Every structure is written in structure tokens, then in C-alpha cells.
Amino acid sequence: MEGSTVSFEQRAISRRDFITNLLRLGGLSAASVGMGAWLKSRSQRPQEQFIAGRAQRVAIPPDPNFPEMVVVYGRDPRQLIQRAVAELGGITRFIAPGEVVLIKPNIAWDRTPEQAANTNPQAVGEMVRLCRSAGAKTVIVTDVSCNDPRRCFQRSGIAEEASAAGAKVILPEKQGFKEIDFQGKVLNVWPVFAPFLEATKVINMAAAKHHSLTGVTLGMKNWYGIIGGRRSQLHQQINESIVDLADFMRPALTIIDAYRVLIRNGPTGGNLADVVMKNTIIAGTDPVALDAYAAKTYWDLDYHRLPFLKLAHERGLGNMHFSQVRSKVVEI
Amino acid sequence: MKYRCLIPFLLIELFALSCTKKDEITTRQTGFLPVMSGWQRSEAPKIYTHDNLFDYIDGNCELYFSYGFESLVSATYQSENNPNQTVTLDIYDMGTPLGAFGVYSSQAHPDYSFKPIGCEAIVSAQQIRFWQDRFEVEINSGDSIADAEKLLSEIAQRVSEKLPACQPLAAMNWLPQQQQVPHTLKYVAEGFLGQDYLPGGLEATYQINGLEVRGFVAKCENADRAEFCLRKYTDAQRGFEGAEVRDKGSYFESFHEYTGHVWAGCEGPWFFGATSAASAEDCRKIAEAIGRNLQMIKTVE
């Protein structure tokens, strides 16, 4: 419709530039051929021992004595976590002494806690403390950030809170990924950040946010933060890939941080006017019900608008009809 | 078959060409990055294109793609006194001024604070976003910076001075300003009104008798195409079970509990109208005002 009126500086090419470019091109050609040969000699199949990742982790079996979903309202994120875990049966129901526990918050963005683009740092810190109190050998906190990881971990406040609580905070490093065959509906061999494969228990701590592509990002979408590679290739089948990831991860416990909710302009946000204080933690063992509840409560969206809910329900990962699961609402 | 040996060289040539394009973007867009006293760039600016924008903003890249995203230069400034204090400056080249306005307006809300930086800026304690010419600019800081909003405004002003000047956007006048709620004008590039056959269009909220009416307009290739869009949109309304549709030829009015009141018509190449949850009368008034405005624009053109 409207054409650009910008004209940028035109650069004339000199003979010197031409020769330099030609030499550069020649160098590139030689390097590319050499690199190709070297890579071919070093390429290998995905490591079989990691393919068993899903089977190694034991999902927490349902217990009729405890709710499958608990919604806790209150002022202090730490107390919200304590109460939510207590209502679900206590931390020893989920973590045994000597376990390697990985806590996966959303630490994707170079944003402060007030901007609500990442998981609440105090909630993460408290979860670390609880796991340590249950005798976990190691508690790892990590995420594959979108923005510069160092700044995301620092500005979100999560590195500081988690370290202070005794966690091993791991920044994602390029060389730390392992090729995994997800054997999913759309996800096949894909690089996964190795700590996610080595933990005996995984706790998902997602932030409740609007998302411009998927409508919302909650617990299941949070698993996008375990993979590397060219994730944009998954966009055409984003709902299926979300469910493949959720199927693969099977966390012991899912927590949705709705203390501050980024109600629009997610996932990046930035403007404090987009953030609504809900002072809520939603926690439980049915990740599909939790996502369905949060989507309905904060955005009035259900499985008609969020296909991943229905796909996950159909695959047996949980119940999208959240009103059918055992649930409890608590106000502190 | 005998040319098969040339394939590796062609691939290398393509790779080299893509590098050259990235170099051009780097040269062009890094020129917009300001020098700030007391602040230094903590690392070389990063350039993102269609191929790797996902790595930086995750699924949000699809929003930028829909508005014609071409490239992004991202720079981080670090305070010389306190390295923990950083400011991130992102300059998106959206290809056209309409694309820049579109992505800016898609994330705007009338509740925000606005400032006259660039064509318009949204200001908050830790973020400034503005659009100017074909660029959409986002500046973010942490909460540890004293008076961050002032600092961000200064940086935004500096960037604005380096960008091509803000030019009036003709499309922004298609919807009349009278009774329009400020800062509700949006450009929707894809799936306008939820219809995939429509071109990108503009919409805005109007306040009339205390009620909200949403006005909309899209410019088609020609008057015939606008007629076609009107017919298709009429059919779409008929598709709602129990919808009351009164087809008047050059326009139609309808009501359904899901869509509310709808009035839609054509004026030359424009397909336009209004929707309202509460009042058919107000809906018609705003739609007719849009029609008169478009007639005037057509006459001037």
C-alpha cells in the first residue's frame, strides 16, 4: 500500500573492493569444502542413551487423597508455593532424597519481574528450597532463553533467588545440547539442552502470559524452552509440537505462576500497563487441566481456540475439562 | 549431468551473497545506533533477519513477519559506572511505513502513555516503543536504573533524529477522526475482520452516545474487487445460524448475537463499515461517516 521513501547511501565498488571480495569468496569456498568434508567425517547418529529420557522419569501417580489441581490466592509468592505444594500432598510426594531435580521456569526474556514475561523469581527460589528440604541431591534451574541468557537470568531475578536457595543455575551453552529422537507426531530428531535429559524429576514452572502466536503460553508451551536448533521450523505445526514436547517431558509437578499475568502483547511484553496482578499460583499433576483452567480464567479461551489443549487431552496427557478434575481453591 | 560438479560452487555463491546482504543491513542499520554519554555498547550489535528472528523473540516473530519484517538490529548499552545496568535498543526495519505503524499499533492500547517521539511513542517505566518511517523501535531497561523513563526518552529521541523523518501516512486518514477514541487506530495486515480474502485494513474504535462502535476500512485493487469483498462478507454473515441480513445492494446491515450489528458497504476501491454490540443506529451512523470521508478522499485524489 504505502511505499518506502527511504533511499540509503549507495556505495560504489572500487577495483580494490572487487579483488578483496573475490579473495574473500575464494577463501569461503575453500573453507566450505574443507568444513563439509570434516563435518561428514564427524557426523553421528543421535545418542541412543538419551532417547530413553521420557521412560527414565517417573510420573507421579494420581492419589485420590489429594487434589489434581490447586489454585492458591495470596500476597506472597513464597507462601503461595508453600501452600500449593502442601495441598498437593507435600514436597516428599514429588521428590525423594538423592534425586536430581530440574526446575524449568520461563527465563526467556530480558525483562524484570514487574514486566511479567518470566516466572516469578521468589516462587522459583521457594521451589528450590522445598526440593532441597526434601533431600534432593542437586536442584538445577535452567531454561533456553530467547534473549541473551546472561541478561535474562540476571534481570529476571531468577539467577539470584535460585542460587541463594541452593540451586545450581545453568546458563544454556551451545555445546550443551544433545540430539534426541522425540518420536513425536511432528517432532523427530531435535537438539535438547542436556540437563533436561539427566534429571530424575522435572518441575515445570511456567509464567501465565498472552502469546501472539498461540493465544497463550502456559505450562505445555513452556517446554519449547528445552530445545535449540531452528525452532521456527515448528511454527506451521506449533500445536502438535507443543503436545509432542509435553508428552516427552511428563513433569512430576506443574506450576503456573499467575502472580503477575501478562495479559496482552506477549510473549515479550515490556509495558507495565499490560500486566495484571492476580496474586495466584496454580499447581497440580494434570498439566492439561492447569493450562485449560488458566486459559479460561484469564483470557476466556478454551480448546476451540487453543487446539493444543484438545490434542493433549486426546493423547492422554491430562483432562482439558478442568472442572472434572479434583481441585481445591485456597485463599491465604 | 556434466554440470553437477558446479552445484557446490553455486551453493557457496548463494551463501556468499547472503553474507553480503547481511553486511549491507549491518552497515545501514547500525548507523542508526546513537552514541550515549556514560553508556557503551557491551558487544557488537546483532543483526536478525527472517531466518533467525525466532531465536530472539520466539513465536512473536510471526507477528512481525505478517507486517513485512525485513531485518532487526539489536544493541545493548552498558552503564560505564555499573555494568549491571543495561539498556537494549531494537530497531526493526518493517519494509514500509504502513508495516511499521501496523506492528506498532498492534501492540498499542488507549490506556498507555504516549509521547511525540518519532511518529508516536508508547512510554512506560521500563520500555519505550515508537515508529518512524519504515522503522519500529523498542527500547528496554531494567528497574535498577534511576529515572529510566527519562533515559529511555533521551535514547529514543537520539534514534529518532537519525531515522528518516516521519511522513504522513495516507491510509491513516481513511477513517474519520471525529468521535474516534485516541490511539485505537490499528492496521491489520492479515486476516482482516477474520476474513482471509480481504486485504490488510484499518480499524478504530468510536465512542458515540457512550457506546463503542468499531469502524473498519480496507482498500482493494479496484472497485470490482471491493464489490467482491462485500458480497463475500455478506455471505459470511449469512453463514451464522439465525443471522438477520438485510442486503441493500450497495451495502448490507445484519445482526447476530455473535457478531452484533454489522453495516458494510463499498466506496470505489474501499470496502468499509462498522460493527457494534449494542446499537444498529450508531453502527449505521459511523459507517456512513466513514463512507462520506472516503468519498471526499476519492474526490481529492
Image (cartoon, coloured by chain):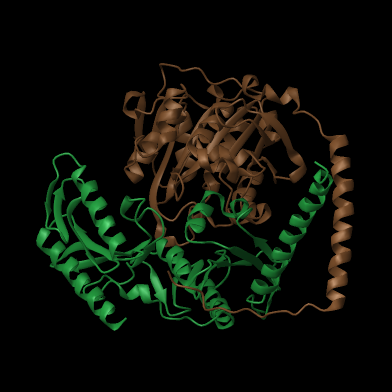
Chain colours: A brown, B green
Residue B297 seen: yes
| The C terminus of chain B sits in image quarter | bottom left
Q: Which residue of the protein is positioned furthest toward the front in this rendering? A: B2
Q: Position of residue A327 (x, y in %)?
A: 36, 27
**The image quarter in which residue B5 lies:** top right
Vertical relation: B150 (above or below) B187: below
Q: Residue at x 85, y 37 (%)?
A: A40
Most foreground residue, B18 or A329: B18
Vertical relation: B162 (above or below) A143: below
Q: Position of residue B239 (x, y in %)?
A: 21, 42
Q: Residue at x 67, y 62 (%)?
A: B47
Is B281 on the left or on the right of B212, as rendered? left
| The N terminus of chain B sits in image quarter | top right
Q: Position of residue A258 (x, y in %)?
A: 43, 44
Vertical relation: A154 (above or below) B168: above
Residue B43 seen: no
Q: Position of residue A52 (x, y in %)?
A: 68, 21
Is A315 on the left or on the right of A183, as rendered? left
Q: Residue at x 14, y 58 (%)?
A: B249
Most foreground residue, B161 or A40: A40
